[in-house]
């Protein structure tokens, strides 16, 4: 193992970098035309769309300015639509398009494949512990 991996901070950063690049490669190989960040937005919307952009941002822990750029690009790809809410025309709800719904199975398959690859050789207990540590890191920062 490389000497720099004696730092948990570096190890986590480099693991995330490899995770991102691996996911990006699989999305490209499957001709989905989306980025890992866009995949996260779609995955969240698959769990319930038609939500205000501020609520979506809270669910995926992104600020509105970052999320707006992702939504703009997903809209250009015809994967989401924005609709003003009748109560507040300044507020937009985000809806999946039929095109996005057709990608759901492929996106879920890719996500499951990435998870299988990155946890290959780990026991269920190790995976549970890993998830617990990642949640603790997330909560602490």
Image: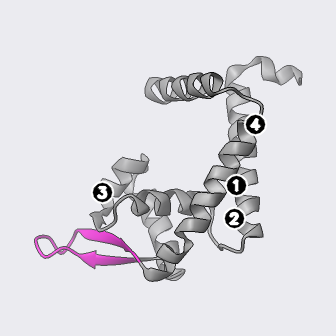
From mark 1 to mark 2, how far is it between C-alphas? 6 Å
**Dot 3: element:** helix
Nearest to N terminus: mark 3 or mark 1: 1
Q: Residue under label 2, please give it.
A: 27
Measure how far apart labels 3 and 4 are at the Cα level. 36 Å
* Residue 2 x, y percent position in the rendering: 89, 24
Q: Is residue 17 shown left or right of residue 129?
A: right
Q: Position of residue 88 (x, y in %)?
A: 14, 70
Count neighbours of disc 1 (C-alpha within 10 A) and say few if under 14, some if 14 to 19, many if 20 or more. many
* Disc on the earlier residue, 3 or 4: 3
Mark pair 3, 1: CA separation: 26 Å
Instruction: Count residues near mark 3 (Cα–Cα under 10 Å), then give few for <14, some for 14-19, many for 20+.
Output: some
Is 4 covered by the magenta stretch?
A: no
User: Which x, y percent locates residue 62?
Assistant: 43, 50
Q: Earlier in the sequence, mark 2 or mark 3?
A: 2
Residue range in magenta is 81-96
Please report contact status of discs 1 and 4: CB closer than 8 Å, yes or no.
no
Check if mark 1's residue and mark 2's residue have beta carbons within 8 Å: yes
Tag 2, which secondary structure? helix
Q: Which residue is mark 1?
A: 23
- Image quarter where the N terminus lies is top right
Residue receiving disc 3: 54
Q: Residue at image x 44%, y 81%?
A: 98
Q: Residues within 10 Å of mark 4 (few under 14, many from 20)?
A: few
Question: Secondary structure beneath disc 1?
Answer: helix
Residue bearing mark 4: 120
């Amino acid at each position: 193992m490389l000497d720099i991996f004696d730092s948990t901070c570096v190890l986590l950063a480099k693991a995330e970098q490899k995770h991102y690049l691996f996911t990006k490669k699989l999305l490209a190989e499957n001709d989905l035309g989306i980025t890992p960040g866009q995949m996260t937005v779609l995955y969240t919307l698959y769990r319930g769309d038609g939500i205000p952009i501020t609520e979506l941002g809270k669910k995926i822990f992104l600020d509105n300015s970052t999320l707006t750029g992702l939504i703009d690009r997903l809209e250009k790809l015809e994967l989401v639509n924005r609709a003003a809410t009748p109560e507040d025309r300044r507020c937009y709800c985000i809806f999946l398009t039929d095109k996005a719904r057709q990608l759901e199975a492929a996106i879920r398959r890719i996500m499951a494949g990435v998870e299988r690859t990155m946890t290959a050789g780990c026991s269920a207990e190790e995976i549970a512990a890993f998830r617990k540590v990642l949640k603790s890191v997330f909560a602490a920062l």
